[in-house]
DNA sequence: TTCCCCAGCCGTCAGGCGGA
DNA sequence: TCCGCCTGACGGCTGGGGAA
């Protein structure tokens, strides 16, 4: 039975109580009724403790289960596969990722493409692409993005090299036709001269090659920390999603085993009736 | 209406694990 | 050994539901 091949799923008793643990115990109990002989094996407590101290990832568990049991769906490695990439949206591999003071993420790809991701959105659905037609090659070690949450006129601004700003344009008047067609409802942006020098809420980030002063080092450290937190945030979300899927899997497994158990009990009763006819 | 409780979600930290 | 990923643990926030 698959469950016995994956007894790593059982957790250490000192770990926090989760509903999934109840499910695991329930599944284990039901499964043991099916294979009591197999479950009678004695495990050394120390060894068991070692094994249980660290459970493998939910993705790994479910994928292993799915290879054993055809009915169990696999968790995809890449989220983008299951959510799908919106067609015609310019996707570039980001080379630098920055988080703004408002929580948005700005990814700068090679060639000057800027992708803006809203924190409230999932995955690529929140990505907004901007083609920097006049960006050219950035100066060495001088990739600097300055972001202002809102300028005086209520629009969003991104300060890019060359004393220019990228301004969110909700009217989409100046957006290139191919961009407008590609982005659908997404806001478009245009390049302007800055309306203010450095508005409130500006966040600056510099590439490692340009670090000289302690202040720049501190900024770099801050940027690294923000990046790490951002990654961990996404990882935590993904982990919770996998955990939910895992619990659902266990729930369905419980249902299946309960039905199976019921059938076996009925079958046993029938066989008992057949094999031991009444003697009166 | 206000207060309390609970469940769910999220961000962050810490630590283990696996690959380079 | 180092680094990135994964996940348990913790605390905060929020919304729903029930009692006063």
Image (cartoon, coloured by chain):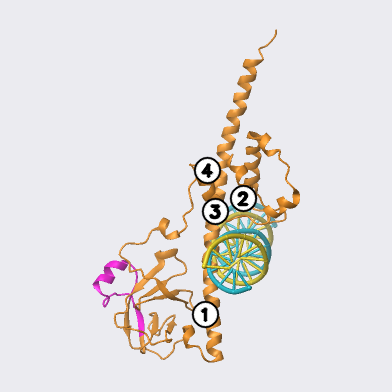
Chain colours: A orange, B yellow, C cyan
- Report how far apart the C-alphas of labels 1 and 2 lie in the structure: 37 Å
Q: Secondary structure at mark 3?
A: helix
Residue A37's image quarter?
A: top right
In the image shown, does A15 or A153 lie closer to the viewer? A15
Nearer to us of marks 2 and 4 is 4
Q: Which residue is mark 2?
A: A20
Q: Is residue A203 magenta?
A: no
In the image shown, does A129 or A28 lie closer to the viewer? A28
Q: Earlier in the sequence, mark 2 or mark 3?
A: 2
The answer to whether residue A250 of the structure is visible from this angle is yes
In the image shown, does A109 or C10 lie closer to the viewer? A109
Q: Which residue is mark 3?
A: A60
Do badges 2 and 3 share one subunit? yes
Q: Which residues are magenta?
A: A165-188
Q: Earlier in the sequence, mark 1 or mark 3?
A: 3
Residue C15's image quarter?
A: bottom right
Q: Residue at x 61, y 50 (%)?
A: A20
The answer to whether residue A203 of the structure is visible from this angle is no
- Report how far apart the C-alphas of labels 4 and 3 lie in the structure: 12 Å
* Disc number placed over residue A68 in the picture, else none: 4
């Amino acid at each position: 039975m698959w469950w016995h091949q994956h007894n790593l799923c059982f957790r250490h008793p000192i770990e926090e109580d989760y509903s999934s643990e109840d499910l695991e115990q329930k599944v284990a109990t039901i499964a043991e009724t099916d294979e009591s002989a197999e479950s009678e094996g004695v495990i050394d407590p120390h060894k068991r403790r070692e094994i249980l101290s660290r459970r493998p990832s939910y993705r790994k568990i479910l994928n292993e289960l799915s290879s054993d049991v055809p009915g169990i769906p696999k968790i995809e490695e890449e989220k983008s596969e299951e959510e799908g990439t919106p067609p015609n949206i310019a996707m570039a591999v980001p080379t630098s990722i920055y988080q703004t003071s408002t929580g948005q993420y700005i990814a700068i790809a090679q060639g000057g493409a800027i992708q803006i991701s809203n924190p409230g959105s999932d995955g690529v659905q929140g990505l907004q692409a901007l083609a920097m037609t006049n960006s050219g090659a950035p100066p060495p070690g001088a990739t600097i993005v300055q972001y202002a949450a809102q300028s005086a006129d209520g629009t969003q601004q991104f300060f890019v090299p060359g004393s220019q700003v990228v301004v969110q344009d909700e009217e989409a008047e100046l957006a290139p036709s191919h961009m407008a067609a590609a982005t659908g409802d997404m806001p478009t942006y245009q390049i302007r001269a800055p309306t203010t020098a450095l508005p409130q809420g500006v966040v600056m980030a510099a590439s490692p090659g340009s670090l000289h002063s302690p202040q720049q080092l501190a900024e770099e450290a801050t940027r690294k920390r923000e990046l790490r937190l951002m990654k961990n945030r996404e990882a935590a979300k993904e982990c919770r999603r996998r955990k939910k899927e895992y619990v659902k899997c266990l729930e369905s497994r419980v249902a299946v085993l309960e039905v199976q158990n019921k059938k076996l009990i009925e079958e046993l009763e029938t066989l008992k009736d057949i094999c031991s006819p009444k003697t009166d």
